[in-house]
Image: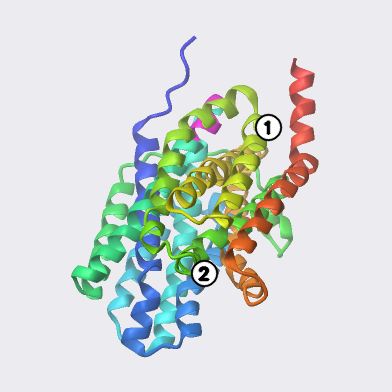
Amino acid sequence: MNKPKLWTKDFIIVSSVNLLLTLVFYLLVVIIGVYAVHEYDATASQAGLVTGIFIVGTLIGRLFTGRSIDSIGRKKTLFTGLILFTLVTSFYFIHLGIGFLMLTRFLHGVTMGIANTATGTIVAQIIPNKRKGEGIGYYSMSATLAAAIGPFIGLYMTQHTSTQLIFILCLMIGIVSLTTAFFVYVPPVERKTSKSELKGMRLSQFIEPKAVPIAIVTLIVAFCYSSVLSFINFYAIEIDLVSTASFFFLVYSIAVLISRPFTGRLLDLKGANYVMYPAFILFAIGMILLGSAQSSFTLLLGGIFIGLGFGNMQSCTQAIAVKLTPNHRMGLATSTFFIFLDAGLGFGPYLLGLFIPAINYGTLYMILGVVVIASSGLYFILHGKKEKAQLNALA
């Protein structure tokens, strides 16, 4: 029996648009704080806010897009997000002080939240049901590629060219993503949401309840991973491995890219538990290796294990959220997943930073490794035991 086709024109287009969107985010996130200091004499806290307020905007964009995407239309929402994303990118050329730069970053985050929620919803819709895990795994690899390429391009360009040229590149990427999206076909979805359900401000209009349990697990593991994103450079300075740290996310991305095709198929064939429980263990081992690193080999080995662990958890939990949800609420499920993911990544550094004066970075990573293992128990309670019972019933 032939498997339903995954690599369709529309799947490739939507994944490409997501790659371009995420590339702009990662390209700017590594240079915008330094730009704020050099261009506007921003303080360290202001530079941090310029960097982080983007994620706050993304959260707000996702929150309202999840509610309205199916009433507006999925493709129309995508175009709205991409047009606004490209328009706001041009605001970086306007010099009206640090306050305007913060506003630009916030609005850029909102537009990213709109467009990214749309791509995530559309791709979940066009992937065949029997290949959901595999398909979302491949789709998520677009963000993984952006996470590897974006910081490299940003840091390379800051050393060899002007920040204005970086902004021009980001604007061109926005235009290309908008142009590419014209060629995607989004099948119509039967609306099952009544007008009365769209009135008022009930929580279920912004959050998909069925996706919340797995989203809580996502929040916790993202919170742990945020320490790697935010503090790896500081930690590298502390243990005198700065040159090695520049390769950390490269080996992380390679580990994700190699493993995701296999874990996606495993999820579809055997269920999420076969991916999630090993991923918890691998992620925890990676954090402990990172926390105990005294050599380049150990540091990079930690990156590989974290990629195999958290990198696969991210796509697996997204697939779970989508599979648990009716098609007409898929937009809300996608939005809910990313809201919790972004909350963990966005607020984690601030909360974890409060503990740094009391403990060093290595100890923090080891403690978070234990937290990752403990969160596997939470996963069992919130989802794992239900999935096991369903698989046993089918056996």
Q: Main secondary structure of the magenta part?
A: helix
Residue 195 in view, yes or no = no
In terms of depth relative to the viewer, which is nearer, 104 or 121? 104
> SS class of the residue under badge 2?
helix
- Choose top left, top right, bottom left or bottom right for residue 272: top right
Residue, x 48% and y 51% (percent of image)? 118
Return the x and y of residue 69 as percentages of the image width and height: 54, 53
Q: Amino acid at mark 1?
A: Asn
Q: Position of residue 142 (x, y in %)?
A: 40, 45
Colour option used = rainbow
Query: Mark 2 = which residue?
Result: 57
> Around disc 2, counting alpha carbons within 10 Å, would you say few (fewer than 14), some (14 to 19), or many (20 or more)?
many
Query: Which of the two discs, 2 and 1, sits closer to the camera?
Result: 1
Q: Residue at x 52, y 39 (%)?
A: 124
Disc 1: which residue: 273
Q: Residue 136 versus residue 149: which sits nearer the camera?
A: 149
